[in-house]
Amino acid sequence: MSELQYEDEIKALNKKRIKYLVVGGIAVNLHGLYRLTRDLDLMIDINEENLEKFVDLMSKLDYGTKVSIDDWKGKVAIAFRHNRDADKQIDVFMRNPIDFKKAYQRRNILKLGKTKVSCVCLDDLLKMKEIANRNRDWIDIGYLKKFKKEGKK
């Protein structure tokens, strides 16, 4: 599964001027460590206008969620699955693990195919991986710190 499968979704986020950051496995890939990942993980600015634009866009792109909008406030993240392609899923944080506004100011604009991507910077990605504290995250941290030390990112 390739992060390029989400290029159209990223283009749409950019076109709608939704404030977002790519995080998770695809961010790891964009920072130079290739590993398989199935979903697109996003942090978005969780203000009413941005969230409304995001939800509207997900609907237009034929993504849906099983979580009622009334239950969103209690969730850490919401999974949006494509209604016609079971392999496509976008997970969006409803409680951002780090300060979005500060992370957005530090973001990297990277390329996904021909599309510019608003991606969390390497230091913030490392911080998020440490917070998540899963085995996969610690493996990523080791490699990403090595890349950083070698000056690859």
Image (tube, grey):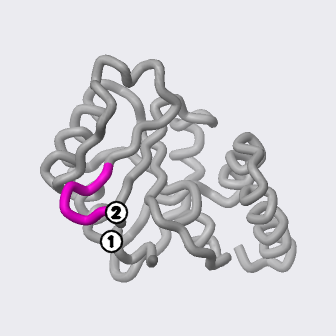
Q: Amino acid at mark 2?
A: Lys
Give the secondary structure at mark 1. helix
Instruction: Please report whichever mark, 1 or 2, sits nearer to the chain's N-terminal start.
Output: 1
Q: Nearer the viewer, residue 75 or 42?
A: 75
Q: Residue at x 79, y 77 (%)?
A: 151
Q: Please give the residue where the numbered disc 1 appears in the rendered image.
A: 7
Please say if 138 is above or below 146.
above
Residue 88: mark in rendering: 2
Q: CA distance from mark 1 to mark 2?
A: 12 Å
Packing grade of label 1 (10 A; few <14, some 14-19, many >=20) is: some
Q: In the image, which residues are magenta?
A: 81-86
Packing grade of label 2 (10 A; few <14, some 14-19, many >=20) is: some
* Residue 127 location (% of width, % of height): 74, 47
Q: Residue at x 24, y 44 (%)?
A: 64
Left-right relation of 124 to 116: right
Q: Nearer the viewer, residue 87 or 53?
A: 87
Number of numbered discs on residues:
2
* Residue 62 location (% of width, % of height): 17, 54
In which quadrant of the rendered image does the C terminus lie? Answer: bottom right
Q: Nearer the viewer, residue 105 or 60?
A: 60
**Does the magenta run of residues contain 85?**
yes
Q: Residue at x 18, y 56 (%)?
A: 61
